[in-house]
Structure formats: structure tokens, C-alpha cells
Amino acid sequence: MTGPFLEVADASFHYGRRHVLDHVALSVDRGEIYVLLGPNGAGKSTLVRAITGQIHLDNGQVLVGGARPEVNASARRSIGVVPQNIALYEKLNARENLHVIGRLMGVAASGMQQRITEMLDRIALGDRARDRVEVLSGGMRRRLNIGAALMHEPSLLILDEPTVGVDQAGRHAVRELLIALRDGGLAVLLTTHEMDEADALADRVGVIVEGRLKAEGTPGHLVAEQFGQTLELIVQLADPSAPQSKVDKVLSSLNLGYDPSTGQWRGLVMESEVSMQVAVNRIMHAGFSVKDIRMRRPGLDTLLAHLTAQRDLQ
Amino acid sequence: MRAAVLKAMVLGLIRDPAALVLSFVLPAAVFAIFALIFAGATGGSLAIKLAVLDEERTSASERFLKGIKTHPQIELLELQDGNSEEVVALVRSGVADVGIVVRGGERTLASGSSDGEPPIVLITDPTREIAVAVVEGIVQESYFGKLPDVVIGGVARIVATDLLPLDPAQKARLDAALEALTRDIEEREKTETASGDSGDDRIRLPFDRLVERRSGIGEPGVSTSISYYAGAVAIMFLLYSALTGGLTLLQERESGLLERISTGPAGARPVVDGKFLYLVLQGTTQVGIIFLVAWLGFGLNLPAHLSPWFAVTLAAAVSASGLMLGFVALCRTMQQANTLGTILVLVVSAIGGSMLPRFLMPSYIQALGWATPNTWALEAYAAIFWRNESWSAIGLPIAVLIASGLAGLLVAHLALARQR
């Protein structure tokens, strides 16, 4: 088969009066990691449910390997799903989990043991095969969570926040595994809130806000297209009790807005207009003590914040 | 695929000691406690604490009370000196279940008169109506058995006055004959008391010569109570265990396991079916352990009824498993299912007869009980162990239990399909 393995065309869906998906179109090729970004409630989960055939779209269609998953069992069978939670049997060991989930996904009993052994090696859990899930580390559970979704050898792997709650080493191992899977020819659709993960893994990114695909492309291209030669200025004041009106006046003049989730002032500035030195001078001149000040090239997090802010303004 | 889920559930249970205890040890322990309590209360060794005060202190009152005091179901609290208020206090405080006072008024037991206050007062506690009913029976038994001269005298006076009027000479002869009868009885009582022999009872009107007691339900006594409570506890725990097992369905929905499996060739159906098979297996084993304890610990004749017992147990397990899976699948969250499910199990068990024998319930509650699996299972066990009935008697309960279980399973499938 030529062309993308997953194709979503003009997909629309609503719950009651709320449009959860609004004419969404995207595609994922074999050997590609597509990262879907979006705030909570943007429609990511609904899109995934449409792709796995769990809901029927109001308009548009989803094709997986050229077939519609909501009516075609072989199309569904070509999908592997890795939920955000650890969807495994806690009291069973790694090998038993792969066996049970493999059987439920239609893997024949003959040759099952060899398949399990291969999968355990692939997810680097061969030496922990007899350990129950409840005693495995967070990273190991995540890898087993992915391995279980691969037991029936899908062509499209869908992952929801695959590294949430995992330490740095665990994240690294999961990312290595996903890159290896991509390089092995798997089409990978990943939803995440972890921007560094998206930066590290994405071949292409789609940003979905209020059911609409607002932007799509490679991370570098998207950021450059959106922000051009602008830089992101990030300031964190040392004294949060500084007079609010004065802080607003000074930092607004630098085009900075307050981000309550991080406690930082952030904003986009033209590289040619505001240098780090100018920013520092203005803030120091106003008498504020600064804990941290940075200027950087905008990333995917800036893009998502920017597109979400546009929604909020509307 | 179903076997894979069944295996996962069984391994999950085996590797969870707390769940093992809750599933198999707790039900048997609760049954044993019920059996120890209720087998004693309903199995022939019922002991009623009776406070007795004889204010009349006549030969007749002594004979009357002797019949009561020596009754095997009475545990006597006798007040030698005192008044009726002390008897009331004993009943009110719960020291005595019932009190009897033979008044020392004008109208005595022997007078045969119907004028004035009754000579016997029963002091009762409304919360112990069963004990009161038993004591009323014992009072009547003692009156007829120990005071036949009083009974005959009363009847003779009615005959002499209303049916066959006697002339004064005849009346005098009747009175003399009754006095002689009383003396004769009193003499015999003294002789019996001295020798410990029950003596000649030609002139008695003993209750047991009037009424023959015969069981209409096979082996009476402890065995019937044991089988009732074995069944009652079993079906209640079947429902509770099925609820707990069914909750894993929501756990797996919340963890995303069902979502993951729903893309598989058979969707989530094997998960529901596998859980159903597991719950039936677990339930059958659970009930088996309870009846094993009833057999080995309390003498229930399980081996004689093994096949019909197994059929009813399997049907009850099917019913509980299907109904609870259906209920859980209709719930949105674990908390909702847990809270509502516990209430449901308790209410259904109360109405269905798992907490209190059905015959003690009002008729409309008994009728309502037929809407619960508890009642059908209990009636089937009663047919097997109490009434020794044939397979045909348990055919309908088995059919109803299996049908309700399969209906519940269907609801579970439909609910999960709707939620997709």
C-alpha cells in the first residue's frame, strides 16, 4: 500500500451542542512519529476514539490501512493502543500480562511463548519477565504497557502520554523504544503534554485547539513559521510582593504577560528590538530584583501557549 | 480469549491473600457464627427465661406452676417473696423474657369462677413475642395437665347449671366427687414428688395425649436451621463477591485496558465473558466451602443431596455473577458501583431471606422476595434439605436463577457496547 497509513479527512463529531472535532484532517505515514498537541478538552481523545473505531463520526472519515476501523475488524486489528494509565494486570507478571493481552488481541496460542520472549527482549524486560507488574519500576511498567500493545504486531501505534510519571531514565528508555519502533516502519501517533518529549520525538506535529487542527508540520518549520525571528523572553521575579501595578507597567512595556502556572512573565520580542541587556536594564531600573531571566528561541510549548491564548482571546 | 481472562482473574485472586480470605474464609466464618447462634435458637434447645411469682400459694397454684417450672424449654427465675412489680422489673431489664404472676386475689385458680380479675398474669416484652407465644402454650398445657380437677369442675358446673340442671342432692354429690378428685390428685402429686415417678395419669388431661407432634418437612431440628443459614449466607456472599469481582470491569475501563482490548478481534466481549466464568467458578467454590463446613461441622447431610445441591449452587452462582456484572456495567464510576452495589446487596439479601427467615416476614415482603435471587436459591435449598423433594421441585428455581444471570450478562454486554 502506498500513501499514509492513517488518514483522517474532514472529521467532525459533536457531543450534544458541543463540536468536539471540527473538520480535522491529518495523516500519519509508516515510519513516522506524529505528535498531537493540545490543551485538555481540545478533542485529542475523541479523535483517538474515532481512529480506533469506537465512535462513528458525524462527517468525514478515518482510514487505517485503507479501511474504515469502525466497520472493519482488520483495520482495528492493525492498531495498537497504549492508554495513559498502566492498563495491565497488577498481580500478573510481565510474561503473563503479555500472554493474556496477546490472546485478547487475537494472537494465536501456538508460537505465543516465542512471541512473548521476543517482545520482552524488545522492551528490555527479558530479565524481569517473572516479576509481577506491581513490583516493576514506573519506566518498566511503561515499556511493558507499550509491549502489550505491540503483541499483535500492529502497523499503527497510538500512545496517550506514554511517559507521564516516569523518571528521566525511564523517559529516555521509552523514547529510545519509540524511535526504534518508528525506524522499524511503525506509524506512531502520540498525544502528549510533554513538550520536550514532542520536541525529541516528533517528525511532525499537529496542534489541536477546540476540535480544530490549528497548525501542522515539522516542529522546526512550525515554530519558524509562527514566530519568525522573534525570541521568547522569560522573567521570574525574586520578590513576588512587588507592587502589582508597577510590575504590570514595566513588564507589559516589554510585551510580557504573566503565566500563573509557572509564576513567570513570558512574551515574544523581536530580536532586533529588545536585547537581553535592554530587558535587564529596564527591570533593574524599576527596582525589581530578578530571580531568573532568559531569552530563547520559541519552542513547541510557546506555540501551544500562543495558539491556546489566541483561543482565549477569541 | 475467555480462558485468558479467566486465568488472569484466578491468578489475581490466588496472589492476593486478603482477597482469598474475603472470598473463602470470611463467608464460612460468618456462616459458622450464624449456625452456632440460630441452630441453638431454632433447633430444639430454645431456653426461655421465665420469672415466676406465686402470690396465691394454694395447692392448685403450686401444681400449676410445677407443670411450668419442669417444662424443658423454661429457664426458671423464681421469686419466693416479692410482688408483681419485681417481676415487671425483671422483664423490663431483660433478665427475664416473660413473667408469670399467679395472683392472690379473690378469684383463685381453683374457684372456677369467671367473675373478677383473671388469676394468672403474663408480664410480656413486645420485642419478644415468640417467647410470649411459647409461654402461653406452656401455660395452657400446664393448666390442662396439672389441674384436671379444676377443668372438670368448671365443665361440670356449666353442665349442671345450663345443660342438665341438678337438684340440690345431685349437686351435693357432684361437689363431693370433685373434692375427692382434687384430694386424690394432690395425694398422687405428693407421691410423685417423693418418688420422682410420673405415676398414674388416668385422670390427667395431658396436652401430649391430645396433640401428636409430627414433622412435615423431613428431618426437623438443627439440620434444617443449618441448611437454611448455609444457603442464606451463601447467596448473600455470592452477591457480594460478584459485586467485588464485577468492579474490576470498571477498574479496567478506567485504566484503559478495555479501550486497548476493544480494538481486538472480539472487542471487550471476552473480558466480560471471562469475568462471568470466573465469578461463577469463584461463587461455586465459595458456596461449596460454606456447605462443607455445614456438613463437617454441623452435621448437614450434604452427601445425600450432592447432585441437586450442586445444580442449585451453580445456578445461584450464575445468577449472582450475571446480575452483578450487569449492575456494575451500568454504573459510571467505581465509587458509584461500590456504594450502590453494597446497598443493593444488603437490601436484596434482607428482602430475600438471607438475614431473617422468610416466614417471619410480613406477607408482602415475602411476595417481594420472589424478585430476588436469594429467595429462589433458599427455596431450592429448602426443597432439597428440608423437604427431601425430587428434581422436579427445584427445576423452576434453577431455571429462574439461570435466566436472571444470563439476562444480567446480556445487560453487561449491551451497557459496554453502548458506552463505546
Image (cartoon, coloured by chain):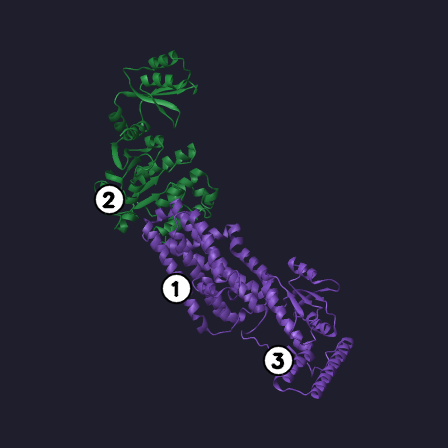
Return the x and y of residue B318 as percentages of the image width and height.
43, 61
Q: Secondary structure at mark 2?
A: strand
What chain does mark 2 sit on? Answer: A
Relative to B239, is B302 above or below? below
Relative to B253, is B307 above or below? below
Q: Amino acid at mark 3?
A: Leu
Q: Secondary structure at mark 1?
A: helix
| Residue placed under numbered mark 1 in the picture | B403
Chain in purple, by letter, is B
Is B27 left, or right, of B250 in this rendering? right
What chain does mark 1 sit on? Answer: B
Pointer 2 with pointer 1, Cβ within 8 A? no
Q: Amino acid at mark 1?
A: Ala
The mark closer to the camera, 3 or 1, is 3
Quarter placement of the C terminus of chain A: top left
Q: 10 Å neighbourhood of mark 3: few (<14), some, or many (≥20)?
A: few
Question: Of B180 and B79, which appears nearest the observer?
Answer: B180
Chain A colour? green
Distance from Cα at disc 2 to Cα at disc 1 = 41 Å
Relative to A134, is A265 above or below? above
Q: Earlier in the sequence, mark 3 or mark 1?
A: 3
Q: Amino acid at mark 2?
A: Val
The mark closer to the camera, 2 or 1, is 1
Q: Residue at x 44, y 73 (%)?
A: B392
Distance from Cα at disc 3 to Cα at disc 1 = 49 Å
Q: Residue at x 24, y 47 (%)?
A: A68
| Residue placed under numbered mark 3 in the picture | B210
Q: Residue at x 64, y 71 (%)?
A: B138
| Residue placed under numbered mark 2 in the picture | A62
Q: Residue at x 47, y 53 (%)?
A: B343
Distance from Cα at disc 3 to Cα at disc 2 = 88 Å
Q: Secondary structure at mark 3?
A: helix
